Amino acid sequence: MKKITIAIDGFSSSGKSTMAKELAKEIGYTYIDTGAMYRAVTLYCLRHHLFNDEEIDEKRLEAALPGLNISFRLNKGTGRPDTYLNGENVEKAIRGMEVAGRVSQLAAIGFVRRRLVAGQQEMGKAKGVVMDGRDIGTVVFPDAELKIFVTASPEVRAKRRMDELVAKGEMASYEEVLENVKKRDHIDSTREESPLRQAEDALILDNSHMGMDEQKAWLLEQYRRVVGE
Ligand code: DC
């Protein structure tokens, strides 16, 4: 059967990663979480003190970037890929509030985007991938055969993010999380470099009031339609 490229873009905590992972597993495709790549670079910056208050030391970052190796390896326990930074499993470290609070700032830097986009294009060139992010259907794979743009209200997304943090034993207040969701939406959609926007040929999925099973069924239906099954 022909292999296609599936681009899933949308706001943070819209549940797109969960959907994308499920779909990839179901149809035997490789799942690539591009947000994890921006998070891994952010973690590197935090660990190497490249953030000074609101600023990032772009000179040092640009020099360090070619030496950063970000990859994904399947975690046999969860059945999902974990993110590795220079050989270290950073899956847990990149999901905390500290990285979440800084990642949008980093993702707005042109040279960081160009480097990560090139890596994403390389990973997806053989097709058979489900890639999730913000600019997959617009910049990384503008020719993707199936593009989905996922959205949900900020309140619903903050609630989901809260649930995730609580499940991991992290403390945060709902107000703090909602604030972070709104702030990231603003930075992601107003930045100059590849702002978050819906590709003209993307299908919109507002999942504010949809369950996981319903979303999965909808997504599978779109996939089958495109591959002509
Ligand atoms: O999907 P996520 O929440 O893990 O993404 C983390 C941040 O990275 C978010 O602020 C948006 C940014 N990002 C991006 O700019 N482009 C992508 N393709 C993926 C994520």
Image (spheres, rainbow, N blue to C red):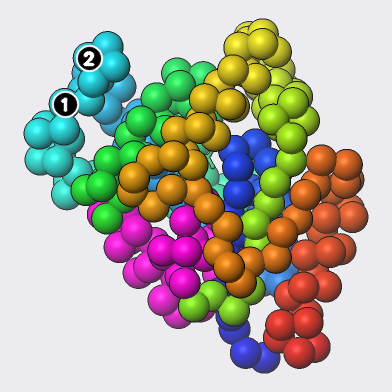
Q: Residue at x 33, y 34 (%)?
A: 106
Residue 20: percent from left, percent from top: 66, 56
Residue 127: percent from left, percent from top: 51, 78
Between 136 and 183, the one lying in front of the other is 183
**Residue contact between numbered discs 2 and 1, judged by CB atoms under 8 Å:** yes
Label 1, secondary structure: give it.
loop
Residue interval drawn in magenta: 115-142
Q: Residue at x 78, y 65 (%)?
A: 219
Mark 2 or mark 1: whose residue is earlier in sequence = 2
Residue 194: percent from left, percent from top: 39, 52
Label of residue 57 in the image: 1
Label of residue 217 in the image: none
Task: Look at label 1 and name its amino acid.
Answer: Asp
Q: Is residue 106 above or below residue 86?
A: above
Mark 2 highlights which residue? Answer: 52
- Quarter in which the N terminus is drawn: bottom right
Q: Is residue 159 above or below residue 72?
A: above
Residue 79: percent from left, percent from top: 66, 51
Is 134 one of the magenta-colored residues? Answer: yes
Q: Is residue 151 left or right of residue 81?
A: right
Disc 2 versus disc 1: distance between alpha carbons? 7 Å
Q: Residue at x 75, y 55 (%)?
A: 205
Label 2, secondary structure: give it.
strand
